Amino acid sequence: MALQTSPEQPAAVRTISRLLAEWIGRLGTVWVEGQVAEFRRRPGARNLYLTLRDTDADISLTVIADVAVIGAVHPPLSEGQRIVVQGRPDFYAARGTLSLRALNISAVGIGDLLAQLEALKATLAAEGLFATDRKQPLPFLPRTIGLICGRNAAAMKDVLVNARKRWPAARFAVREVAVQGINAVSEITAALHDLDAVAEVDVIIITRGGGSVEDLLPFSNETLVRAVAGVSTPVISAIGHEQDMPLLDLVADYRASTPTDAAKAVVPSLVEQQQVIQALRDRARSRLTGQLERAQTSVLELRARARAGLLRGVELRQQQTTHLTAQLRALSPQATLDRGYAIVSGPSGAIVRDCGELAARDKIAVRVATGTFTATVQDLG
């Protein structure tokens, strides 16, 4: 039966604490999986305390275990280790604190971790998070490169040195975070969202220089994988571990095998681009030179053709002129005179075409081929 309370009849703290303890006590024995966030051995202590943290959320629970339970864990319990705890939830009413009394603790084996990763991989693949068609192309020359890496890590130096060797003007926005352990997922995810919100950042590299399966677990974490799938900026995964591919490699827009490979993928080579530009210049110069040579040849050919056409035209006109001149000469009076004919002009000076136009003793002028002479008509036949 629910406890009846009101502003006029509030319950005492001890009553609420007792009811909470009774309700939590009814949960019985539970099995809980998590990651050891904090653990310190205290010599001589009967009970030892550890903080068990959720692997995907910032939620933790205090676990109390006696020395025998802790001692039975193999390999020995350590911070960052994944464990399964069998225990009873306990609410300490006097202080209002919740804890888990451990009855048994076992380390999660590599086989179990890999099986969990395979199951998560299948789930995310079915949702389409690894599909090729959702991957974004990398920019040719990013304005600013976001870099998420370990603090003062060799992987960071590899990316910076090799990228700037290829493109000296490359700009970086670096976020140094934990890349293994209990804080890795939350710090990497926060840095990812931070860089994604910067307008100048055109691509983000998440890098680490390899490691064991346990060390690389944060890069297969569901929270981080979904965060990478959800950002608008292209992401390069450069974990540098070929044997065991973390899920980050599958969801990223580009997978680099090493930090150095990421540097090669994120910026072009200045030397290679200069060579490309020079080759394009040479090709353009060669093409232009060829076009000019062909144009000059064409102009020369046109000039020769025009000259030949003009000469043929002049020759034709000369032939036509000669022919017309000959025709004119053949039709001219002089040509008639040259053949032995004469032109007779009467006393009036008009050309005589009929003997009836003349009379006896008329003075006439006779024109022959080489001159003119006068004569007197003696007889008209």
Image (cartoon, rainbow, N blue to C red):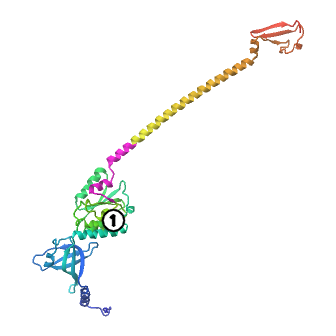
Residue occupying the point 75% across, 19% down: 331
Q: Main secondary structure of the magenta part?
A: helix
**Residue at the disc numbered 1:** 228
Q: Amino acid at mark 1?
A: Val
**Res 222 visible:** no
Residue occupying the point 72% across, 17% down: 329
Query: Vertical placement of 297 versus 224: above or below?
Result: above
Packing grade of label 1 (10 A; few <14, some 14-19, many >=20) is: many
- Tell me residue 197's x, y (percent): 35, 64
**Res 133 visible:** yes
Pick the front one: 156 or 321: 321
Pick the front one: 29 or 42: 29
Residue occupying the point 49% across, 33% down: 296
Asked whether 95 falls inside the magenta stretch, the response is no
- Tell me residue 217's x, y (percent): 25, 67
> Which image quadrant: the N terminus?
bottom left
Query: Quadrant location of residue 35?
Result: bottom left
Query: Quadrant location of residue 120?
Result: bottom left
- Tell me: 61 left or right of 292: left
* Element under disc 1: helix
- Tell me: 31 left or right of 363: left
Query: Vertical placement of 179 versus 140: above or below?
Result: below
Magenta residues, start to end: 254-280
Asked whether 271 falls inside the magenta stretch, the response is yes
- Tell me residue 177's x, y (percent): 25, 64
Query: Vertical placement of 272 versus 210: above or below?
Result: above
- Tell me residue 378's x, y (percent): 88, 6
> Which image quadrant: the C terminus?
top right
Query: Quadrant location of residue 213?
Result: bottom left
